[in-house]
Image: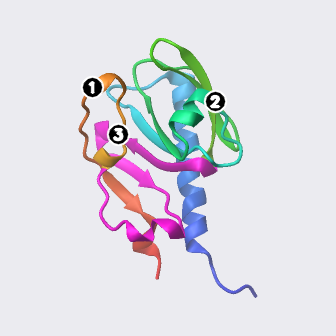
Amino acid sequence: MSQGIDYGNLMHTAMRGLIKTVLTDVSKSGLPGAHHFFITFDTREDGVDIADWLRDRYPEEMTIVMQHWFENLEVGENGFAITLNFGDAPEPLYIPYGAIKTFVDPSVEFGLRFESPDDEDEDDYVADDLIEVEEEEEAHHDADIVSLDSFRK
């Protein structure tokens, strides 16, 4: 018999499956109602494919917003591809699910946070910390975040 059940990894897999299901629905039907997403991911993760200038600007992590304009959303087994607009310049991105650190839908106050052992020092978390808004626009959204640390012993 194995050492034990790795609930943390099982939860991560289930939560990433939830994101995949949501993005699949959006790719087929578009964003319903006021739904929109803030997705923060680790730009250093294997498989992340972004333009060099974006990687230079966001060498560790980046937050994207899926709301008013996005194209070519293709959801795969291991990640998703999307084209987003950066200052009137469309850029394709590929983000593996394993690179996602947070997924927030502020319209319904829903959020997921994927934690690693390095994140254990961060006790308090507010979705506002996620939001990086281009062109000096302000956005403030509160969301309930599901943290795996609350399930770990």
- Mark 1–mark 2 distance (CA, rounded to whole Å): 24 Å
Residue 103 vs 132, above or below: the answer is below
Identified by mark 1, the residue type is Glu
Q: Residues within 10 Å of mark 2 (few under 14, many from 20)?
A: few
Q: Residues within 10 Å of mark 1 (few under 14, many from 20)?
A: few
- Residue 73 appears in the picture as rendered: no
Residue under numbered circle 3: 131
**How is the rendered protein coloured?**
rainbow
Residue under numbered circle 2: 52
| Residue at image coords 58%, 42% | 20
Residue under numbered circle 1: 137
Q: Describe the element under mark 2 as helix, strand or loop.
A: helix
Identified by mark 2, the residue type is Asp
Give the magenta range. 98-126
Q: Counting residues from the N terminus, which is met first, the one under dot 1 or under dot 3?
A: 3
Identified by mark 3, the residue type is Ile
- Mark 3–mark 2 distance (CA, rounded to whole Å): 22 Å
Q: Describe the element under mark 3 as helix, strand or loop.
A: loop
| Residue at image coords 35%, 55% | 145
Left or right: residue 101 compared with residue 142 = right
Question: Which-is-in-front pick, marks 1 and 2?
Answer: 2
